[in-house]
Amino acid sequence: MESLKPLDMNSVMDIKFIKEMFSSIQARTSALCFQCTTCTNGCPVVLNFKPRPREELDLLPHQLMHAVRMGLKDLVLEARMLWACTECYNCTEGCPQGIEVCDVIYQLKNIAIKERKNLIPRGIRIFANALLDNGRTAEIMEWEREELELPELNGSGDDILKKLLTQMHLSEIINPKPKL
Ligand code: SF4
Ligand code: SF4
């Protein structure tokens, strides 16, 4: 009988990624996950994709936590769950182990934005660019304000937000560099 080859863990686990994740106090809590699936069962996004959430989201919240511990960087960064998450904190609040699930997801998004801008969904890029260009994502409808008998806006703060986001270099953060 042919013997199984030993698994080359270095080719599967990204140790640098584990170190990077575990440098944050919040992400380190994922080490305590015992896979009870409470986070997944209480997640509104998962619920929204029933009956086939796994097929639609790639990894469910409890699977994300496990994959982080295993250093499966490509798998977690490419999971659609990452970007579908609405950051509602239901998972964090319900976790019996006190795992900061939502903050772990934030950290994963930060890594993706730094290293894999191509993974940022188009919708998020459009949203961010609208904020940069207009200081808002939807137009103010003056007629709606009139109908609701709201007073005229005296300065909306759009310019302040635009300036702030420009100073934060949001465009460079969110948009991939143009190819030369
Ligand atoms: S609820 Fe907490 S312990 Fe249970 S699977 Fe989710 S992260 Fe792990
Ligand atoms: S924070 Fe994200 S993963 Fe957690 S319950 Fe809300 S949508 Fe689901």
Image (spheres, grey):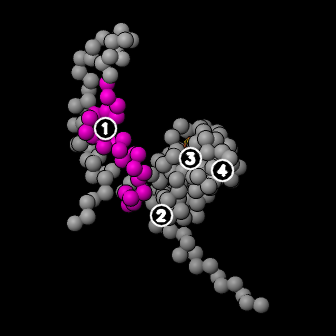
Q: Residues within 10 Å of mark 3 (few under 14, many from 20)?
A: many
Q: Residue at label 2?
A: 17
The answer to whether residue 74 is above or below residue 124 is: below
Mark 3 vs mark 4: which is more N-terminal? Answer: 4
Quadrant position of the N terminus in the picture: bottom right
Task: Determine the secondary structure under disc 2.
Answer: helix
Tell me the kind of residue under disc 3.
Answer: Val
Range drawn in magenta: 115-140
Q: Main secondary structure of the magenta part?
A: helix
Residue 83 placement, left or right of 69: left
Q: Residue furthest right?
A: 1
Look at discs 3 and 4 and give the one toward the viewer: 4
Q: At x 42% / y 57%, what residue is drawn? A: 119
Asked whether residue 107 is drawn in magenta, I would say no
Dot label at residue 101: 3
Mark 4 vs mark 1: which is more N-terminal? Answer: 4
Asked whether residue 118 is drawn in magenta, I would say yes
Q: Residues within 10 Å of mark 2 (few under 14, many from 20)?
A: some
Q: At x 55% / y 72%, what residue is drawn? A: 12
